[in-house]
Amino acid sequence: MSDSETLIDVQNVYKTFQKTHALNGVSIQFQKGRQYAIHGASGSGKSTLLYIMGGLDRPSKGKVIVDGNDLSKLSDKELALYRNQFVGFVFQFHFLLPSIKCLDNILLPAQISGKVDKSVEQRSRELADLLKVSHCLDKFPYELSGGEQQRINIIRALSMRPKLLLCDEPTGNLDSQNSATVTQLIKDLAKEFQATLVVVTHDPKVRESFSNSLFMQDGKLLKSSSHTDGLPPVPPMG
Ligand SMILES: Nc1ncnc2c1ncn2[C@@H]1O[C@H](COP(=O)(O)OP(=O)(O)OP(=O)(O)O)[C@@H](O)[C@H]1O
Ligand SMILES: [Mg+2]
């Protein structure tokens, strides 16, 4: 049952690739402005769930309702608009365009939507400063380390102030100290933008810093728990 506090309502979602059942009946609600970590073994379906919530793929069965709107009813064009205006995605593997410089990569979503103005660029420069990649903005992605590329990716994901921020191993390329710093920054920024944050992570330390921790196994969400941030736990489902 969804309510006005629910941003994403995943209803009994299945995803099958040929013979692989990547998602096996996942039901979960993500509340507005809350922050969630997802963990689970390789191949358990974490990225697939994120892609489907982010409108990058469609379920084989089941529904995803976003703020009361059924994603399956959207045309491909409307789904592209949803991705552009509503979702920020930090991918497990970087998806920076190799042929344009990092600042242009960051401004790409705004350019696509026709909303580039000085404030987007200024905000991006401030974020680059915070994430210590100012020196990278005028470089091409191949000139950056993996960790630097990942931070550019994070800035791009935030450039449109998304209501939903989906991060797939956002600190996978960082050492433990930078990992903690970048995770905290992502959380602070999501809070500032009042975005719902969902982070897939293998790092137990990162996971423990989230109030809501979800566990995936064999395409199912098996466990949900809540730590002590005074908020009620995620409804157990799935
Ligand atoms: N496009 C695809 N075509 C075929 N099979 C796929 C595709 N995408 C995912 N799968 C399969 O679906 C299952 C779930 O994949 P998924 O990428 O969601 O796992 P994951 O939990 O993100 O794993 P990891 O921690 O390694 O990133 C895997 O068995 C994978 O091989
Ligand atoms: Mg994955």
Image (spheres, rainbow, N blue to C red):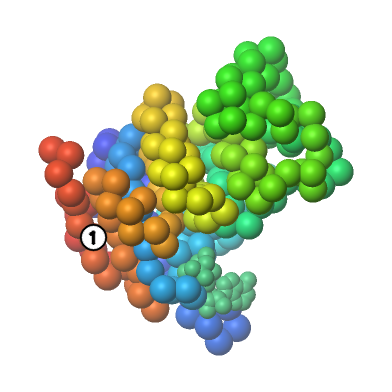
Instruction: State the residue at coordinates (39%, 37%).
Output: 184
What percent of the width, then of the height, locates residue 15?
Answer: 50, 72
**Against 11, is 212 above or below?**
above
Asked whether residue 109 is in view, the answer is: yes
Residue tagged by mark 1? 224
What amino acid is at disc 1?
Answer: Ser
Location of residue 187 (image quadrant):
top left
The structure residue drawn at horizontal position 29% and vertical position 46%, both measured from the top left corner, is 209
Q: Secondary structure at mark 1?
A: strand
**Residue that lies at the very extreme toward the right in this rendered image:** 99
Q: Residues within 10 Å of mark 1 (few under 14, many from 20)?
A: many
**Residue 186: where, in percent of width, then height?**
45, 37
Q: Compared to 204, does 195 lie above or below?
A: above
Q: Is residue 95 left or right of residue 221?
A: right
Identify the residue at image location x=55%, y=32%. Answer: 131
Q: Quadrant of the C terminus?
A: bottom left
Q: Would the CB of label 1 be found within 8 Å of ligand 1?
A: no
Does residue 69 appear in this view? no
Q: Where residue 53 sits: x, y (%)?
A: 48, 53
Residue farthest bottom in this picture: 19
Where 23 sits versus 79, above or below? below
Q: Quadrant of residue 99?
A: top right
Q: How many marks?
A: 1
Of all residues, the one furthest to the top in this rendering is 118
Name the residue: 64% across, 42% down: 148
